[in-house]
Image (cartoon, rainbow, N blue to C red):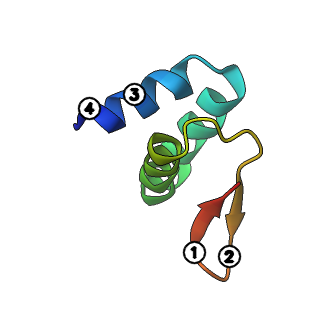
Amino acid sequence: MSKREQTGLSIINGHIGKRWVYENYKKSNPDMAEKYLQFISKNQSAQYIIWDDKKQKFTA
């Protein structure tokens, strides 16, 4: 795991809502969980994160 991913994971674990979303994705769709982690890692200050179904990626 890269340093950026570790930072993203610490952000997720430090926020109850983001942690809940991430844990649910890990259970139901591990690929989405990985994309969520990557998005948080790159956009550390993002607050309202949504899934863009057309682009198949998260946006804020």
Mark 2 in CB contact with mark 3 (< 8 angstroms): no
Query: What's the residue at 51%, 57% (across, down)?
Result: 32
Residue 3: give its label: 4
- Furthest residue in direction bottom, as rendered: 54
Mark 1 neighbour density, 10 Å: few (under 14) some (14–19) many (20 or more): few
Would you name the residue on which mark 3 appears?
Answer: 7
Query: What's the residue at 64%, 21% (across, down)?
Result: 15
| In this rendering, the label closer to the viewer, 1 or 3 | 3
Identity, as a three-letter code, of the amino acid under mark 3: Thr
Name the N-terminal-most of marks 4 and 1. Answer: 4
Mark 4 in CB contact with mark 1 (< 8 angstroms): no
Tell me where residue 53 appears, x and y as whole percent. 68, 76
Name the N-terminal-most of marks 2 and 3. Answer: 3
Tell me where residue 20 appears, x and y as whole percent. 65, 30
Nearer to us in this view, 2 or 34: 2
Write down the quadrant of residue 51 in the picture: bottom right
Nearer to us in this view, 25 or 52: 52
48 w.r.t. 45: above or below = below
Would you name the residue on which mark 2 appears?
Answer: 53
